[in-house]
């Protein structure tokens, strides 16, 4: 078992959330793993790294939401009633070596946890709209978590030479800014809270990742670095409208 | 190109060096092993012609199955040319990674570090350990 920092952050803006994840990835490159859970202070659209900013025009219900470009791939996500996680780990960590293994570590353990709550989700085995849809949750790729053929969890990665960041979203409820996407509540009637899910998921993640989680806060150095990354990158038009 | 004539980065980029009147020109791509590991490629971000790169510096990104990976230059130099056909034809990486799948040509400005690149046999050993 290796030690892994555990952060459970208060809801924040999109550019702050993405800046934190980048700094955690930078720290992973220096040898430190971190698992982070977070939420969003207002409904926010995040674009996949290669998506065009102008494509958000095709999604009318989220036009009034703030928008941030992720460093990771995949389609756009409307973050609202969801639990978001990020996991940053050094590349020499065995589980970071194969991208599919890391997706499976989170998604398979989540499926087992959801079963405990009476939610019968399954792993996607057949890709569907893998590239063509604007929204990530309308793209089904192998390894996604599905419930009644609706995607309720997807993850994406950014991989550097010395570190890997994976972050993902668990759709707890439908958002008025993305009404085409039902959440766990709409599909099952089960009102699952983010905190209950975190507490149930942690032991299974610990086993899957072979990690002991140690509760922590961001250091003052990290907080300073996050401010800079937010200002220079994720909060800037240059980054968010770069494509 | 024959992989036996190439040098490799630990991060899976290959480089072919050839002499020209102005010095060495490096043709750079990503290895067959990397293409197989990445599987379904969907996007690539290419560097701008004229950009100056240091060995080990990120020069672009490639996306596969929602993972964006950085690409690292094996040499220091100036970007002379990029293979702009790749963006609409990513299957060429699988079909011909050491030929039509080249990504960029770089005029080498500093040869230090080239000796540390891996030959095919050493790179193959690294891949076997990773795979």
Image: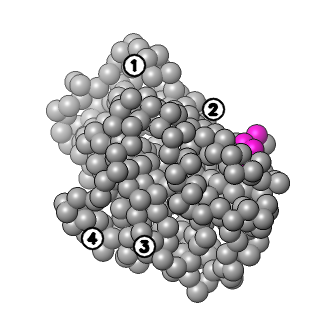
Q: Read off the residue under disc 3.
A: A12
Q: Nearer the viewer, mark 4 or mark 2?
A: 4
Same chain under badges 2 and 3? The reply is no
For label 1, the residue is B126
Q: CA distance from mark 2 to mark 1?
A: 23 Å
Which residues, given as a range, are shown in magenta? A121-125
Q: Nearer the viewer, residue A140 or B19?
A: A140
**Which mark is first along the chain, 3 or 4?**
3
Q: Is residue B91 above or below residue A23?
A: above
Q: Pointer 3 indicates a residue of which chain?
A: A
Observer-nearest residue: A243 or A70? A70
Where is mark 2, residue-wise?
Answer: B95
Report the side of A163 relative to A180 (left or right). Answer: left
Residue beneath the point at 74% across and 75% down: A179
Single out the mark in the foreground, 1 or 4: 4
Kindly report the distance in space between the C-alpha atoms of the residues bearing marks 2 and 3: 45 Å
Q: Which residue is mark 4?
A: A227
């Amino acid at each position: 078992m290796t030690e892994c920092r555990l952060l459970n952050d208060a809801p924040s803006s999109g550019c702050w959330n993405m800046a934190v994840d980048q700094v955690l990835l930078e720290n992973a490159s220096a040898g430190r793993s971190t698992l982070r859970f977070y939420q969003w202070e207002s409904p926010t659209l995040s674009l996949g790294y290669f998506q065009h900013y102008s494509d958000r025009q095709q999604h009318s219900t989220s036009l009034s939401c703030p928008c941030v470009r992720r460093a990771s791939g995949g389609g756009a996500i409307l973050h609202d009633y969801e639990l978001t996680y990020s996991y940053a780990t050094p590349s020499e960590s065995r589980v970071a070596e194969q991208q599919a293994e890391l997706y499976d570590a989170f998604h398979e353990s989540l499926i087992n946890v959801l079963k405990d709550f009476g939610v019968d989700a399954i792993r996607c085995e057949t890709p569907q709209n893998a590239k063509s849809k604007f929204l990530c949750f309308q793209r089904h790729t192998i390894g996604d978590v599905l419930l009644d053929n609706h995607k309720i969890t997807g993850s994406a990665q950014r991989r550097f030479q010395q570190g890997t960041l994976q972050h993902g979203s668990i759709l707890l409820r439908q958002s008025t800014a993305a009404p085409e996407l039902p959440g766990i509540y709409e599909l099952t009637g089960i009102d699952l809270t983010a905190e209950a899910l975190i507490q149930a998921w942690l032991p299974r993640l610990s086993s899957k990742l072979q990690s002991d989680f140690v509760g922590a806060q961001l250091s003052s150095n990290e907080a300073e670095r996050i401010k800079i990354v937010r200002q220079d990158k994720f909060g800037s038009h240059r980054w968010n409208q770069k494509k | 190109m024959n992989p036996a004539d190439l040098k490799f980065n630990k991060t899976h980029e290959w480089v072919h060096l050839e002499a020209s009147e102005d010095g060495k020109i490096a043709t750079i791509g990503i290895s067959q092993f990397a293409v197989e590991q990445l599987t379904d490629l969907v996007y690539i971000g290419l560097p701008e012609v004229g950009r100056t790169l240091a060995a080990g510096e990120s020069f672009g990104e490639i996306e596969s199955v929602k993972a964006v990976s950085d690409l690292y230059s094996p040499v220091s130099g100036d970007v002379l040319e990029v293979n702009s056909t790749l963006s609409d034809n990513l299957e060429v990486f699988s079909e011909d990674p050491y030929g039509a799948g080249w990504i960029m040509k770089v005029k080498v400005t500093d040869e230090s570090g080239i000796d540390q690149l891996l030959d095919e046999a050493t790179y193959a050993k690294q891949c076997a350990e990773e795979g």
